[in-house]
Structure formats: C-alpha cells, structure tokens
Image: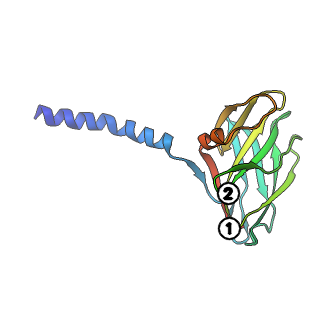
Amino acid sequence: MARVRSTFLAGGLLAPLLLTVLTVVAPSIAEARCTGPGTETISTMSYNGLLRVEENPVNGTCDGDNVYRSQIRSRVGLWTAVPYIQNGGIWSPKGSASELNVWTPYQYTDTNSYSYIMLCAHNPGKTNWICGWGSNSLVLATPAGTQPTQSQLQYVNAYGVNSNF
C-alpha cells in the first residue's frame, strides 16, 4: 500500500512539471492574419509588457491572389519594426518601419497563400533584436549592424500563421 501511495504521489508531483515542460516547448502559434476571404486581423509583438510592433493587413489583401499587402509600425521611439516571413523554411525580412507610430507599407508574394510571420524590433544603436508574436518574444543578441540568424529566428518559436491571402 505504501508503494502504491508513493507511486501516486510521485505521479501527482511530476504531472504538473511535465505539463510545464510541454507548455514551454510547444510553439506559440496565433490565429491567421487572414482569417478567411476578406477578413484581415491586426497583429502585435510586446516585450516586458510594452507594445513594440503592430502589423495591420491592408483592407482587401485576403483575396486569394497570393500577394500579402500590409503595413507595420514601431511603437517605441528609436526602434525599427521589421516583419519576418517564413515560407519554405527560411525567414526573410520584408520591409521595416523606423518612425514612431508611422505605418509603413510592405508586401510579399508566395505560391500557396500560406506562410509564418514573426514581428521584430531593433534599436539600430544597439546589438539586440526582440522577436516574437503577441506577448511571446525573446531578446536575440547579434553583432552590431547584423540581423538575427536563421537559427536564432527558429529558436524564438513564436509566430503567426498567415493564410488565404
């Protein structure tokens, strides 16, 4: 009986720990930026509770023509907002916005109207980038004047799914 109780006790103590590990390892995937034909959704990226980047698809971009049209803006002075898109396994920057609270347009084309999107912020006077999705973001250390590496961007593991554009 003591052995059965200790097994249940150990299982009861380990189950929350296992759930925590699974929660940390699972990617943070948000709803689609185009939630369906003609339905655009605004995206954000925050770090330490501070809104850093906003991304707003242009009305009409969710039309099924494989061209995603959007705009991005930095919400922190002296920081540049950069959208990164992954299609086919490679993350690529698709424009940038340097002026505080000024929407800057960007667009990209793909062949299947399906990609991942990650929002990043960079202070050009510093070496760090902050990348992620929603409130799930990480600081990425980079040499001065460089962008995050593919392995750094893959490690962030927080992105939105963009489809039906």
**Tally of marks:** 2
Residue occupying image coordinates x 86% and y 33%: 78
**Crowding at mark 2 (Cα within 10 Å: few <14, some 14-19, many 20+):** some
Q: Secondary structure at mark 1?
A: loop
How far apart in space, not on screen, are marks 1 and 2 (Cα)?
A: 9 Å
Q: Where's residue 20, x and y in %?
A: 44, 38
- The mark found on residue 92 in the picture is none
The residue labelled by disc 1 is 112
71 vs 138: above or below: below
**Crowding at mark 1 (Cα within 10 Å: few <14, some 14-19, many 20+):** some
- The mark found on residue 87 in the picture is 2
Residue occupying image coordinates x 15% and y 37%: 4
Describe residue 89's horizontal placement relative to residue 75 as left or right: left
Is residue 4 shown to the viewer in this render?
yes
Quadrant holding the N terminus: top left
Residue occupying image coordinates x 29% and y 37%: 12
At label 1, the amino acid type is Asn
Quadrant holding the C terminus: bottom right
Is residue 136 shown to the viewer in this render?
no
At label 2, the amino acid type is Asn
Between 97 and 39, the residue placed more toward the observer is: 97
Residue occupying image coordinates x 70% and y 72%: 37
Q: Where's residue 67, x and y in %?
A: 78, 66
Q: Secondary structure at mark 2?
A: loop
158 vs 161: above or below: above
Q: Quadrant of residue 52?
A: top right
Between 79 and 92, the residue placed more toward the observer is: 92
Q: Are marks 1 and 2 in contact (CB under 8 Å)?
A: yes
**Mark 1 or mark 2, which has the lower sequence index?**
2
